[in-house]
Image: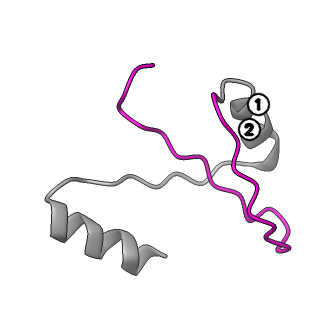
Amino acid sequence: MIDIIEEEKQATGKAISVAYVSHEEFKARTHESKAVVRTGECTPYANVIFQAGVVF
């Protein structure tokens, strides 16, 4: 995944930050979510929060 992020950064010239948080902090952050995408991933704690720079 880090390789893909680096490729995207080089292609777009925009920095992409990655932060690792505890499961408890992840759950707390989801309360501020506008949408949830369920992928069906079975790996424990294989979750991602995407933050866009667009205000809705």
How many marks overall? 2
Q: Quadrant of the C terminus?
A: top left
Q: Nearer the viewer, residue 35 or 1?
A: 35
Image height check: is 47 above or below 26? below
The secondary structure type at the circle numbered 2 is helix
The secondary structure type at the circle numbered 1 is helix
Q: Residue 50: which numbered mark, if any? A: none
Instruction: Count neighbours of disc 1 (C-alpha within 10 A) and say few if under 14, some if 14 to 19, many if 20 or more.
Output: few
* Residue that appears at 66% across and 30% down: 33
Q: CA distance from mark 1 to mark 2?
A: 5 Å
Question: Farthest bottom residue?
Answer: 3
Amino acid carrying label 2: it is Glu
Q: Is residue 34 left or right of residue 3?
A: right
Q: Is residue 14 left or right of residue 28?
A: left
Asked if the residues shown at circle 1 and circle 2 are in contact, with their CB atoms under 8 angstroms apart, the answer is yes
Q: Nearer the viewer, residue 48 or 17?
A: 48
Expressed as whole percent of the image width and height from the top left, the position of residue 48 reads 63, 54
Q: Residue 28: which numbered mark, if any? A: 1
Image quarter of residue 35: top right
Residue bearing the label numbered 2 = 25
Amino acid carrying label 1: it is Ala
Image height check: is 50 above or below 16? above
Q: Is residue 37 left or right of residue 51?
A: right
Question: Farthest left residue?
Answer: 13
Expressed as whole percent of the image width and height from the top left, the position of residue 19 reads 52, 51
Which residues are drawn in magenta? 34-56
Instruction: Count neighbours of disc 2 (C-alpha within 10 A) and say few if under 14, some if 14 to 19, many if 20 or more.
Output: few
